[in-house]
Image (cartoon, rainbow, N blue to C red):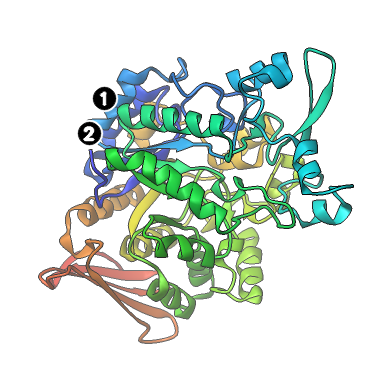
Amino acid sequence: MPIQNKTMLITYSDSMGKNIKETHEVLNNYIGKAIGGVHLLPFFPSTGDRGFAPYDYTVVDPAFGDWDDVEALGKEYYLMFDFMINHISRKSEMYQDFKEKHDDSKYADFFIRWEKFWEAAGENRPTKEDVDLIYKRKDKAPMQEITFADGTTEHLWNTFGEEQIDINVKSKVANEFFKQTLTDMVNHGADMIRLDAFAYAIKKADTNDFFIEPEIWDLLNEVRDILAPYKAEILPEIHEHYTIPEKISQHDYFVYDFALPMTTLYTLYSGKTNRLAKWLKMSPMKQFTTLDTHDGIGVVDARDILTDDEIEYASNELYKVGANVKRKYSSAAYNNLDIYQINSTYYSALGDDDRSYLLSRAIQVFAPGIPMVYYVGLLAGSNDLELLENTKEGRNINRHYYSKEEVAEEVQRPVVANLLKMLAWRNEFAAFDLDGSIEVETPTETTIKITRQDANGDNVAVLEADAANKTFTITANGEEVMTQA
């Protein structure tokens, strides 16, 4: 099924029901036309990071179902799968074969061998300066020791968790793996591939090893060439300054809008609409918008859209206004990997306030691009402190497990019912076509008017909102669709 200009749901396979089959039932029975696509978070056998340390892409984790369940979902919704282009699990065939056979392994070049990498860069490398230069996700050199069956040891590049060993994307054996895996994914129903941790994939001496040009474009083009015969799209996942997604957009790829979450929070906390208006005017149409994802709320993504003082203000307000949001939940004490994200559901970041929350989603609906809504956000979920404390994993505050029965109850809440109604309307109204236009005005300091229009000018949708008192009105071709007085 080709990608449609309809809201995409982000969900794990066991978060709206126990497995993929139950998730499918939930969508059909309770969510309806509010959703047109599904980003099914990693459903492959994995050894960590809630699926992001896969060791076998050829099968579905039996706990979630099988390929028939995935393909059945794909007959009704366009689908996005994750491909961890930067890394793979230590339990993978590649790692195990290399560990057993060392240089005789067919996967001897599959990983980035730390010592060999630096030997090629020159004598007495890496220096402290080399290691300090690397854009790291932890407070030590990104390497991990491997002990081979012959008793010798080396180190492999290891950017993320202990289970996630980096792939040498320049190697022939890795390229063959990419082609086989990506082809299998589209044959099983993937219409879009999300390239997880994409910006970390290229390693090059004398750089910070993050979004290294021009090599990063070679890698992206390689993936696009593999997928082109299947008309499948790519969505590179990068949390950083908005100018990096801007570059990717200029190469005609879909991008994420990770700046919108913090910009919208600032708008609703401060009551000032100027920064939001500026960002909406800058944003590309070929993008997926977010307010929430399976990770935390990004801070660095909004830098220079908001000033440093405004980011600090919004962050402080989040901890002040947010329901059960504490700084320690985004710290090492709760296994937080990224100091530039805050762990909270979006609903709780807005103080579990229905009016603020529904307005935030109205803003997302009218922003350029296709809305992407995380399952907890779709159900206006509050912070799950019980799961957080049981696991001591900061991001689990936003990863509640809903049973089918819970979903049936949640959709009865007015804020959820209104959100589903808003999304269903947006999915069918032509004014939101990606080849259409957007006009943004700020009549006063606290108000904003966003007008979306299709390319022919036949359909017009208007959002008029006041960020200070959280009122808004939505009209379609002059007729009222929804109002919050």
Residue corresponding to mark 1: 72
Name which residue type carries label 1.
Ala
| Circles 2, 1 touching at the beta carbon (< 8 Å) | yes
Quarter of image, res 179: top left
**Please, what secondary structure does the residue beneath circle 2 have?**
loop
Quadrant of the image containing the C terminus: bottom left
Question: How much space separates mark 2 and mark 1, taking CA atoms?
Answer: 7 Å
Horizontal side, residue 359 vs residue 103: left or right? left
Residue sitting at x 68%, y 39%: 160
User: Is residue 242 visible to us here?
Assistant: no
Residue sitting at x 78%, y 18%: 148
Horizontal side, residue 66 vs residue 328: left or right? left
**Please, what secondary structure does the residue beneath circle 1 have?**
helix
Relative image position of residue 246 (x, y in whole percent): 46, 65
Q: Residues within 10 Å of mark 2 (few under 14, many from 20)?
A: some
Residue corresponding to mark 2: 76
Quarter of image, res 184: top left
Name which residue type carries label 2.
Glu
